[in-house]
Amino acid sequence: MKALDGIRVLDFTHVQSGPTCTQLLAWFGADVIKVERPGVGDATRSQLVDMPGADSLYFTMLNHNKRSIELDVKTAEGKAVLTRLIESCDVLVENFAPGVLDRMGFSWEVVQSINPRLILASIKGFGPGKYADCKVYENVAQCVGGAASTTGFRDGIPVVTGAQIGDSGSGLHLALGIVTALYQRERSGRGQKVSAAMQDGVVNLCRVKLRDQQRLENGPLREYSQFGEGLPFGDAVPRAGNDSGGGQPGRVLRCKGWQDDPNAYTYFITQAAVWPRICVLIGRPDWADDPDFATPEARLPRLNTVFEAIEAWTTTLTKFEVMEVCNPLGIPVGPILSMKEIAEDAGLRESGTIVEVDHPARGRHLTVGCPIKLSDSAVEVTPAPLLGAHTEEVLTGLLGYSATELEQLAQAGAFGLPRRAAAE
């Protein structure tokens, strides 16, 4: 039994934020029916294509474990099918531009009248306010959510991160909202609207920087590098390079081979509890008792000196050797792993975080697995569906349409061009 067995999700999402959400639900056992435009499908099917005749990796990595149907909801027949799907589903998820669902004729009031138990879940760029009707993409979300202004080095421009905190981060937030609403429905018997704004999600993930904004009003941020360098702070949280965001100072340091390998680095944290061990390790045992270095407070103005000494040691070892030496001592470090190293990591494959699947057009390929592990709900990652692969299966098996009715729907254009004409 899967955690979400028996839950049926109508997936009107596209690109990344919404599909991230619905893929999580599918991994946990929900029956996710992805509704796509006839003959076209999700835009990402054809974006960044690397193999002719196959859906892109962008699409396949976001749509595992789902069923795909083609449906033209601009036709009267398509709207009738959609109405029956809403009647039979528990959740409808969409990340259309603002107002699209209303213009389709399926506002919240209409959806609720069709199925009062339905959860209507939406991802938008912004919450209520003057920007509510604006569209947002990944990097825009990072910018308006505070991530970009606090990422990068203080003498450089704002920088967005490679982690998709705007799109995939919003999908994760929405998935939690959906399962929470489903849980409440067990007691109330009612569905409800669930929304996740991309700006809000990024702000939530940037909470430590919002913390620092308030701290800044009471004095300089002493754990930031610029404090130790005697540089003044402005009225907003600055970019802090690779400084740690917590109370334990840390930085990215070079390791052996850094001259030729762009990822020959480690992240090293000078945790207070293991400071004496760090001192011995880097050949400065005297610092353990030196008043200028013995306490975290004393070290803050001297962090550049501290990390220069540590880096003189890390450059004598590879990033993996640094980890092998430091871990037994309880010193928190982490090698900077390239995506190639991630793809080849045996531990990530064993845990199911990275998996291989067989796709009917692409063949066997590497993809992400479920990042959340449940002991009683194991996840088997299945290939992303071909466009419309389950149209007949869903309409006949779930909605009870006969073969004749299905042909009539096709002739009416509910699936785009009539199937026979399209085949010819």
Image: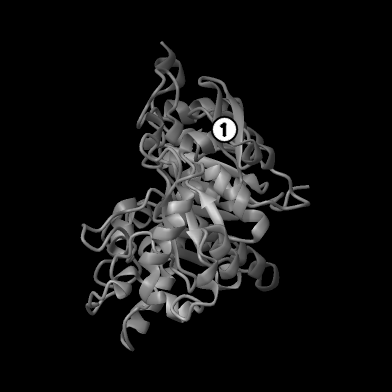
Question: Which is nearer the eye, 264 or 121?
Answer: 264
Say which residue appears at 72% left-offset and 53% top-offset.
Answer: 374
Q: Is residue 197 above or below residue 229?
A: above
Q: Residue furthest bottom?
A: 218
Residue 357 image position (x, y, % from top left): 60, 28
- Can residue 299 be seen here? yes
Residue 110 image position (x, y, % from top left): 46, 60
Horizontal side, residue 212 vs residue 67: left or right: left
Q: Residue furthest front?
A: 286
Say which residue appears at 61% left-offset and 45% top-offset.
Answer: 370
Horizontal side, residue 298 vs residue 190: left or right: left
Q: Is residue 195 above or below residue 346?
A: below
Query: Label 1: which residue?
Result: 344
Question: Which is nearer the eye, 59 or 209?
Answer: 209
Residue 53 falls in image quadrant = top left
Q: Amino acid at mark 1?
A: Glu
- Can residue 107 be seen here? no
